[in-house]
Image: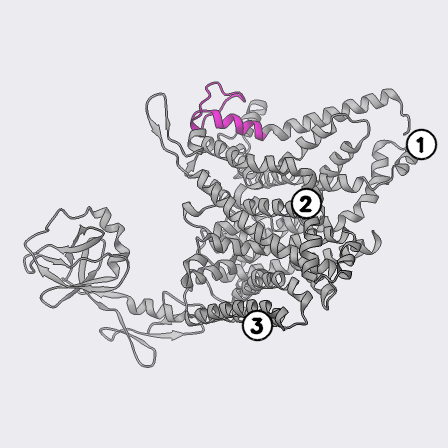
């Protein structure tokens, strides 16, 4: 380590801390504001950061409970936030599990088995992963609109249709898992080959148990990606009961019905779980990010 | 060979299921999807049935999913760009013909009021007497959409109090499927929200496929080039059906100034938006990462957690929060600006300000990703280089620009291209924050100042402008070309990195 001029060093430290603190203050402003707004009465009120007249009205409504104001009027919840949350969790979990199954098996083959066309397929995957499914929205709508005539379970407003479309996200994750498999010691499965293990046995009993950390990472990343999706869900889901959080939350802030306070409480309620999971797991998630694509 | 028996049985079962599904789709007039399932069945049979394709079995599910859920929709979108698919041409020709044949004309003077009598979960139609005809009560029907001609009998009055009008209106779909046969031999159908009437089909189908009106005055001829029935005067009769129209959509894009000019503007803004978003997030992310790597800095873990917060919060929530905070009248950002300067910027109606806002929000959302990546890459920059530069008297800024930056940019290139491509199509941000607005005045189609190509296409297909799927598909093809170029550049960049790097 080089010894720098102590006075210049101290000045630079102050500068660095000052810049970071200022930056973080600006950064946190929206979050602090939204907490404050969720506690103010009414949907249009303005005021200080610390509400002068705090009320839990918006929070009652976010949890789907009726709220009785001081003057006796009863406010009914306008939107089923908890139901939307459940829809998001359901669709996200099923789709992330599907993506995990498909991409793990494929990643194993790309990493450990030698077959014709392997390099070509890998390149093709790299190219295709740049085409997000949102580009094909028109076709997706047309496809599921007509499949709905065959079976409503595959039509517009069906969660299964959404799950099927989300499976396309697997291209992002094949690469992440393959990178992890590539770093595992080849001696492990060479030993298994000598013992006469089939490719499937090598995958199931040697590599899969070692891959649990990356599988958790991919699951969380895929899940967050699906919960964050707006375009696909917004064209496939029309009725309020079937909506996911991302589609439903949009209803709070339109020109004709501006429910700023209600939105604030609902946003914190629905955003907090994912934020906490992400922050707890961030060290592991970050390693998965640089190999895969960009968070949506 | 008993060892492979379970596999073969499983394969056979899956194939049978797929074939049954394929046949069902074909019978239900969806031959395209039938063929897709058939192809899937063939693939399963070959890969899992034949003993040679051991490795392919692992890749097949993923490849099939990519083909079905990415390649097919992408190809289908391109195909739609060459059709007239849209709100006027949603149906197949068979369905459009059915719709026209199902339209009925009301015979004059035959309308009668009606009301519904509930009976458990079934309903009777009650037609009160009107001087010439006696009151009539039909047999009960569940009104669930099933078609039936209901017998009826003459009565003196309603047996019980009829349903309120708005409950009857709620059952209109069920009512449209039934008819009431009156005792005098007439057949009355649902004609309006309040009335039943004797009706006759507007058109009858001739053997040559022409549709002729009851009085013979109008004749409709199907025109498969336009996807419409054309009447004697050459006018189109809705509903139309989907036909291929060749390059008509592309001609519209390039020939109509009302479309071409906004589209060009949107394309340029898309490029500027993606480039600035990528550049600004990269600059901010690398700066913060360098600061966080500085050995003399205390409280690093705290800073790090706080700095990645925008990345941890689901983006749709952050975007909507900003939508509220930037609100012109009661948004908190304008309240602060107003106390400081006295003015209230029009974030959502002034084009330049709206674009600035979009960029601010996107940088806020995107810099943590760059910061995290940069922190990883910075660790591989050897300390000796910067130390040597310090000895030579280089200040921190020079050291960063001359030593550190050149070493972390090469591994960053593919990720920068990917980020550019992501922002090129970052329609979540645009749709949730501004919805594309403010609208550019004087355009033929709704186009906004903050619209990027993707959000513009989305609005064309799914919002306010009447589901112009064909035109949207044509524009998507242009986006595909741009993204395809980026994907190719990315592939080249990754190849170069894997050749040079570890």
- Left or right of B8? Residue B208 is left
Q: Which mark is residue B42?
A: 3
- Left or right of B9? Residue B414 is right
Name the secondary structure under disc 1.
helix
Near mark 2 (Cα within 10 A), the count class, few <14, some 14-19 or many ≥20, is few
Whether labels 3 and 1 belong to a single chain: the reply is yes
Furthest residue in direction front, as rendered = B2
Near mark 3 (Cα within 10 A), the count class, few <14, some 14-19 or many ≥20, is some
- Mark 1 belongs to chain: B
> Can residue B494 be seen in the rendering of this structure?
yes
Furthest residue in direction top, as rendered = A52
Identity of the residue drawn at 37% across and 68% down: B95
> From the viewer's perspective, is residue A176 above or below residue B286?
below
Near mark 1 (Cα within 10 A), the count class, few <14, some 14-19 or many ≥20, is few
Q: Tell me if residue A56 is in the magenta stretch.
A: yes
> From the viewer's perspective, is residue B213 above or below residue B468?
below
Q: CA distance from mark 3 to mark 1?
A: 69 Å
B10 vs B56, nearest the viewer: B10
Earlier in the chain: of badge 3 and badge 1, it is 3
- Residue B488 lies, in percent from the top left, at 71, 59
- Left or right of B370? Residue A165 is left
Range of residues picked out in magenta: A30-58
Residue at image mark 1: B391
- Left or right of B497? Residue B182 is left
Whether labels 1 and 2 belong to a single chain: the reply is no
Name the secondary structure under disc 2.
helix
- Mark 3 belongs to chain: B
- Residue B22 lies, in percent from the top left, at 48, 70
- Residue A159 lies, in percent from the top left, at 47, 52
Identity of the residue drawn at 54% across and 52% down: B456
């Amino acid at each position: 380590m080089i010894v720098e001029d102590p006075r210049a060093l101290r000045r630079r430290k102050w500068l660095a801390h000052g810049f970071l603190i200022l930056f973080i203050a600006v950064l946190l402003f929206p979050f602090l504001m939204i907490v404050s707004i969720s506690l103010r009465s009414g949907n249009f009120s303005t005021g200080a950061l610390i509400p002068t007249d705090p009320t839990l009205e918006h929070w009652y409504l976010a949890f789907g409970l009726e709220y009785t104001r001081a003057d006796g009027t009863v406010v009914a919840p306008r939107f089923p936030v908890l139901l939307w949350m459940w829809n998001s969790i359901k669709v996200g979990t099923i789709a992330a599990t599907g993506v995990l199954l498909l991409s793990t098996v494929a990643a194993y083959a790309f990493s450990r088995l030698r077959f014709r066309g392997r390099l070509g397929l890998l390149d093709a995957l790299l190219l295709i992963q740049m085409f997000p499914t949102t580009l094909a929205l028109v076709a997706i709508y047309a496809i599921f609109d007509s499949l709905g005539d065959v079976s409503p379970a595959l039509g517009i407003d069906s969660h299964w249709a959404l799950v099927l479309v989300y499976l396309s996200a697997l291209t992002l994750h094949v690469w992440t898992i393959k990178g992890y498999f590539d770093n595992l010691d080849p001696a492990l499965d060479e030993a298994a080959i000598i013992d006469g293990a089939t490719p499937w046995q090598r995958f199931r009993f040697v590599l899969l148990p070692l891959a649990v950390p990356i599988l958790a990472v991919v699951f969380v990343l895929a899940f967050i990606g699906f919960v964050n999706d707006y375009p696909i869900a917004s064209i496939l889901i029309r009725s309020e009961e079937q909506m996911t959080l991302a589609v439903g939350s949009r209803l709070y802030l339109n020109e004709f019905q501006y429910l700023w306070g209600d939105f604030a409480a609902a946003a914190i309620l629905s955003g907090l779980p994912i934020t906490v999971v992400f922050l707890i797991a961030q060290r592991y998630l970050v390693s998965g990010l640089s190999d895969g694509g960009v968070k949506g | 060979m008993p060892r492979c028996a379970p596999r073969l049985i499983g394969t056979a079962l899956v194939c049978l299921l797929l074939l049954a599904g394929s046949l069902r789709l074909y019978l239900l007039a969806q031959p395209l999807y039938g063929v897709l399932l058939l192809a899937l069945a063939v693939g399963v049979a070959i890969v899992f049935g034949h003993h040679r394709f051991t490795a392919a079995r692992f890749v097949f599910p993923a490849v099939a999913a990519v083909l079905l859920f990415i390649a097919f929709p992408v190809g289908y979108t391109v195909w739609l760009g060459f059709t007239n698919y849209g709100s006027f041409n949603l149906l197949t020709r068979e369905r459009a013909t059915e719709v026209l044949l199902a339209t009925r004309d009301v015979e004059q003077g035959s309308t009668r009021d009606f009301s519904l009598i509930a009976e458990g979960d079934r309903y009777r139609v009650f037609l009160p007497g009107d001087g010439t005809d006696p009151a009539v009560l039909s047999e009960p029907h569940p009104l669930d959409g099933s078609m039936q001609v209901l017998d009826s009998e003459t009565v003196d009055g309603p047996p019980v109090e009829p349903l309120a009008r708005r409950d009857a209106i709620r059952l209109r779909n069920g009512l449209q499927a039934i008819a009431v046969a009156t005792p005098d031999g007439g057949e009355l159908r649902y004609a309006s929200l309040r009335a039943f009437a004797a009706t006759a089909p507007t058109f009858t189908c001739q053997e040559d496929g022409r549709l002729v009106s009851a009085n013979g005055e109008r004749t409709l001829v199907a025109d498969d080039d336009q996807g419409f029935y054309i009447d004697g005067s050459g006018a189109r009769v809705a509903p139309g059906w989907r036909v291929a129209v060749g390059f008509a959509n592309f001609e519209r894009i390039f020939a109509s100034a009302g479309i071409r000019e906004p589209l060009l503007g949107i394309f340029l803004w898309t490029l500027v938006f993606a480039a600035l978003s990528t550049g600004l997030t990269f600059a901010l992310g690398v700066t913060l990462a360098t600061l966080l790597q500085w050995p003399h800095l205390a409280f690093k873990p705290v800073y790090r957690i706080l700095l990645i917060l925008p990345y941890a919060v689901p983006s749709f929530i952050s975007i909507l929060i900003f939508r509220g905070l930037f609100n012109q009248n009661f948004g908190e950002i304008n309240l602060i600006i107003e106390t400081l300067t006295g003015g209230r910027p029009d974030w959502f109606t002034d084009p330049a300000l709206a674009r600035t806002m979009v960029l601010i929000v996107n940088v806020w959302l995107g810099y943590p990703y760059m910061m995290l990546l940069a922190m990883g890459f910075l660790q591989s920059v050897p300390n000796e280089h910067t130390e040597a530069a310090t000895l030579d008297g280089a200040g921190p800024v020079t050291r960063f620009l001359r030593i550190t930056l050149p070493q972390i940019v090469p591994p960053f290139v593919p990720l920068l291209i990917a980020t550019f491509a992501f922002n090129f199509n970052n329609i979540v941000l645009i749709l949730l924050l501004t919805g594309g607005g403010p609208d550019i005045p004087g355009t033929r189609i709704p186009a906004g100042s903050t619209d990027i190509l993707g959000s513009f296409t989305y609005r064309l297909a799914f919002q306010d402008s009447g589901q112009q799927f064909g035109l949207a598909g044509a524009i998507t093809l242009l986006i595909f070309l741009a993204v395809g170029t980026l994907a190719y550049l990315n592939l080249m960049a990754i190849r170069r990195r894997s050749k040079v790097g570890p």
